[in-house]
Image (cartoon, rainbow, N blue to C red):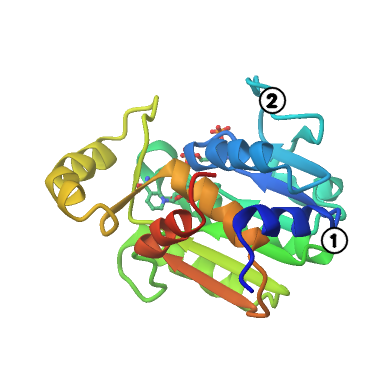
Amino acid sequence: MTENFEEKVKRYKDMGKTAFVIGYTGECGKELVKALSKNKIFSKVVLVGRRKVDLSPDPGPEFEQRIVDYDKLEDHTEAFQGAHVGYCCLGTTKGKAGKEGFIKVDRDYVIKSAEIAKSNGCQHFSVITASTANKNSMFLYVKTKGEVEDALKNMAFDKLTIFKPAVLLCDRAETRIGERIATTIMKPWTMMFPTTGSVPTAYVGRAMVIDTVTPGDEKLRIYNNGEIHGLVKQDGKK
Ligand SMILES: NC(=O)c1ccc[n+]([C@@H]2O[C@H](COP(=O)([O-])OP(=O)(O)OC[C@H]3O[C@@H](n4cnc5c(N)ncnc54)[C@H](OP(=O)(O)O)[C@@H]3O)[C@@H](O)[C@H]2O)c1
């Protein structure tokens, strides 16, 4: 008999696992924290970031913030110590960080965090890349996301989940011209075909939790934009 979402959550919760989240102050990260707080699937969640933020509403006593220097992650292995599951919602833009800065955050920090997590007991790594990711592309964004996927696949986690959203929909405080243009151009398309070219960040956060509690022996799970919508719809309202 197929378990419903509540049953999956209960079974998962009973395992007493712990997790960390990097990129928890970002748009997808905030939604992931909300979904984790609502479903309480972990006994402890370490929120790893470069700055402390006001977490309101309080997500719960199992959450703790840990400040790290991402350029010296090897000095902060304790932040990742013992976590069974690692979530990565990290990212920046070329506009914000420059080419080198973008590669550093979106590729190097992600890979380094995953390596440290793996050598400290992480069984399941769950990461957001992009629908277009392709390591052979000539385009920086697409290529970088593809290189990350490739490196993570070679790390042999017990389980690796890759979320590949198209355009993220959210009320972003910060103005991103490219994202604004893409969202505006996509609007009629999004209305006609809501699951193809975009996905709300809330769905990504929820999908990450739904995937975590969904049992299965596959070592690699990949969700494209439509499948992120499908996952949320299938397990509904969480
Ligand atoms: N935008 C889109 O339409 C789109 C589409 C597909 C995939 N994606 C990908 O989806 C992922 C999540 O996107 P998002 O929009 O939720 O991200 P976001 O809102 O930009 O959040 C990014 C996170 O990364 C952290 N970060 C950025 N630069 C950092 C640095 N130098 N050192 C340490 N931490 C740093 C931020 O921390 P602070 O709060 O401290 O800055 C924040 O927690 C990204 O990898 C993005 O590339 C985006």
- The x and y percentages for residue 62 are 81, 36
**Label 2 element class:** loop
Asked if one can make out residue 111 in the rendered structure from this viewpoint, the answer is no
Q: Can you tell which quarter of the image residue 144 is in?
A: bottom left
**Left or right: 164 with respect to 44?**
left
Upstream in sequence: badge 1 or badge 2: 2
**Label 1 element class:** loop
Q: Are marks 1 and 2 in contact (CB under 8 Å)?
A: no
**Left or right: 110 with respect to 144?**
right
Q: Which mark is residue 120?
A: 1
Which residue type carries mark 2?
A: Lys
In the image, residue 115 sits, relative to residue 68, either above or below, namely: below
Where does the N terminus fall, quadrant-wise? bottom right
> Label 2, on which residue?
52
Query: How far separated are the C-alphas under marks 1 and 2?
Result: 23 Å
- The x and y percentages for residue 135 are 42, 73
Which residue type carries mark 1?
A: Asn
Q: Residue at x 53, y 74 (%)?
A: 150
**Left or right: 98 with respect to 126?**
left
Around disc 2, counting alpha carbons within 10 Å, would you say few (fewer than 14), some (14 to 19), or many (20 or more)? few
Q: Can you tell which quarter of the image residue 139 is in?
A: bottom left
Where does the C terminus fall, quadrant-wise? top right
Q: Residue at x 76, y 58 (%)?
A: 12
- The x and y percentages for residue 234 are 46, 59
